[in-house]
Amino acid sequence: MKAQPPHRLPPSTINAEFHLSPVDRFRRDNDPEWHWLEDRDDPQVSAFLKAANAEYQRWMAPLEGLVERLYHGHLARRELAVHGLRTALDHYTYWSETTADADYPVWWRHRNGHADEATPFLDLEARAAAQHYLELGDMALSPDERWLAWTEDTSGDERFSLYLKALPDGEPHLLLEEIGPELTWAEDNATLLFTRYDATQRPDSIWRLPLDEGQAGEPTMILREDDPEFWLGLGKTRSRQWLVLESASKDTSECHLLPALAPEQPPRCFRQREKGVEYGVEHRPGHFYLLHNRNAPHFRLDRVDEHDLEGEWQPLVHHRDDTTLEGVEAFEWGLAITERDHDEAQVRIRIVELDAGHDIGRDERLPLPESPCSVMLGDVPHFDSRCLRLREESFVMPVRWFEHDLDSDKRVLLKAQPIYGDLQPQELRCERLWARAHDGERIPVSVVMRADLAGTPLPTLLYGYGAYGEVLDPWFSVARLELLARGVAFAVAHVRGGGDRGEPWYLAGKLEHKENSFRDFLAARNALVEQRFSDGERIAAYGASAGGLLVGASLNLAPEAFCAAVLDVPFVDVLRTMENPDLPLTTAEYTEWGNPDEPDARKRIRAYSPLDNLSPQPYPTLFLQGSWHDSRVPYWEPAKLYARLTEMGTARGPILLRTDMAAGHGGASGRFKAWHDNARQDAFILWALGLADEA
C-alpha cells in the first residue's frame, strides 16, 4: 500500500504562519495525555481549539474552490423549497413549509376541509434569527388543538426550554428552563408532562405541570428514577387512553401507567423490572400488548387483560430464531408490527388484524419496493385509521411517502423527493456483498456507485457505526451524489453491535464481544477489495460518535488499511469517560460498554479504547471534528486524539482538528451551514482519495 495517496498538498501549507504548531505551543510536559483539555473554564483550552481551527482553515485554503463547487452542486441537486406532508387531526390539518432560502421550517395549519384558511403558527426561522444555534426538541399539541407546547435548545448542550402559546397567533411564553426535550399532553387539555435532568444530564424525573388558559401552576414530580443506569421517557397510547412513563436502561425496562383523562392519579407500575428483560406497552380497549424478551431473546408479543394486569401474559406472536420483533403499533383493527429478518438484514412491516374475539384474522407482510431498502410507518394519528402512511427509501431510491389502504391494498404516492442534475437515481447501482469475519461470521456490506463504473475497483468511502443495536438500513443522500458523480463508491459495513441482523447481531458486538465490531469493519474493507469493488490503496473510513470509536479502534488494529479517515464527534477516550460517573451518559452506558469498576470490564475497555492504544504506527491522514457544547462526546475527546497523534509524528499525512464552537453533538443546526460543513468534509475525502485535482 502506498504511503500517501496521490495529489497531496505540500506539507508547507500546514502552519505556514507559525513556527510552532498548536500542539507544540500548548504542550504541557507534566500532562502528556492532554487531560488538561477537559477544563473548559481554562482560557487556554479555547485558545488551543481556536489555534487548531486556524491551522485547519489554512490547510483547507487550497481546497476552498472545491468546497464551493461541492456545496453549490449539492444545492442544485435538491429541492430547496420543501412542503411537508399534511396530517389531519381532529380539528385541523398540519404541515411544515421551508422556503428555498430558509434554514428552518414554518409550521402551518387550516381547519379540516378549509384549505383556503391556512395560518402559520410556529416560525422556527424567525425564532432562530437571533441565535447561533436552534434545535427543536419536541412539539406537542393539546388534544383540543388550542395550545402548542414545545421545547428548544439554543446552545447545543441538549438542555431545553419549554414554551407555550395559544393557537394560532398567541405570544409564546417561556414556562421552564433546563429541562429535557420530551413533552406529552394529558387528555384533559390542562396538564403537560415533561422530564428533568439530574447532575449528569440523565432524565431522572417526570413532572406534571398544571395549565389554566396558558397560566402555569407549580410543577409536581410524579416519578423519579434513582438507579443511575436508567433514563425516563414519556409517551401516550394511540388509543389516547393511557400515558406511558418508561424507565429503561440498555437492557432492562419498566413501564408505569397514568389514565390520560385523570393525570392527577399516581402512576401505576405495569410490571416490575426484571434484570435483562425489556418490554414496551401498547393498548387497545380491553387489552395491553407487550413486546418483550423474557425467555425470548429476539422478542415476542403477548397481551394481558386491561383490568387484570397481574394476569397471565397470553401469547400472540411467538418467538422465532430467524426474526427479531422491533416494534408494535396498535390500532382499532389490530396491530402493525415491525420485524427484521436475520439472514437478509431486511426490515418488514407485518399487519395483524384482530377480530371481535381478539383472535388473529389477517396476518401478512406489506410488499417491499426493493431489497435491501428501508420502510417505516409514518405519522398515523387516528386510532381507527385503515390507511397507513409508509416511508420508503434505499441507497438508490430517494425518499417516497405512500398511503396504503388496508381494505383495497392500493398504494397512493403522496410525495417523492425530487432529484435534479446530471446524476439521477436510475444511473446508480447498489449491491449487497458478504464479508467473512475473523470467526467465520458473514458480515453484510452495502455498496453504491455509478452504474457505468460497476466492475471497476473504485476509490471508496467506507461508513460504519456498530453500537446500541442501531440499524444502518439503506438511506438516500443528496450530498452523497457529489462523491458518486466524481467516481467514488460509498459502502456501509453492517457490523456486529448494530441491529442490522436483529437482536443477536447487537448482542454479538457489545460488552465482552465488542472487538467483533472492529474486526467486522476491517473484514468489510478487505471484502470490498477482494471482490473488486474498491481500490485497496484508496479507501477512506468514516465514523461519527460511537462510529468514531469503531473507526479509531480499527485504525489502531490496521492503520495501513485506509488512506484517510474522518472521525466526527468521535467517542475515543472510552476508558477515561467510563471511569467518570459525573459525565453525561456514563452510568447509563455501563450495560453497553461495561463498568470499569469491575476489573474484567476495565481490562476489556482498556484493550480497545482508541486513546489508550495509540502507538507509533503509520496512521493515515485524519480529519477530526468536535463541538464545544457537545454533552454526549465532549470536545476534548477528538482534541486529545489530535494532540497525541500530532506529537507522535508517525502519521502518513496531516492530522486535522476542527471544533465547532457554536454547536452540539449533531453539529450545525441550520441546514445551509450543515450542508456547507458536509462539503468541507467531502473536499477532504476527495483530496485524500486523490481526486481533488479532477473535481
Image (cartoon, rainbow, N blue to C red):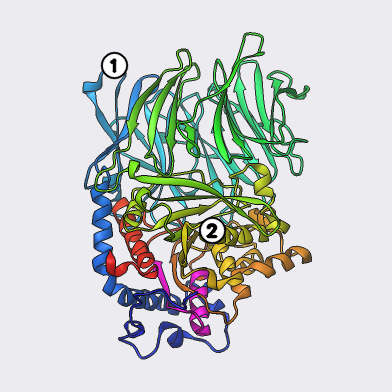
Q: What amino acid is found at the position of numbered circle 1 in the picture? A: Gly
Residue at point 72%, 27% (across, down):
318
Q: Which quarter of the picture shows residue 455? A: bottom left
Q: Is residue 149 left or right of residue 132?
A: right
Disc number at residue 547?
2
Report the span colored magenta: 637-661
The residue sitting at the front extreme is: 455
Contact (Cβ within 8 Å) of mark 2 with mark 1:
no
Image quadrant holding the C terminus, namely bottom left
Q: Residues within 10 Å of mark 2 (few under 14, many from 20)?
A: many
- Where is mark 1, residue-wise? 113
Task: Determine if the magenta segment contains residue 188.
Answer: no
Q: Position of residue 664 (x, y in %)?
A: 43, 58
In the picture, measured across the screen, residue 26 lies left or right of residue 582, that is: left
Q: Nearer the viewer, residue 479 or 295?
A: 479
Of the image marks 2 and 1, the number of the one nearer the N terminus? 1
Q: Residue furthest top?
A: 356
Q: Residue at x 66, y 43 (%)?
A: 503
Asked whether residue 625 appears in the rendered view, the answer is yes
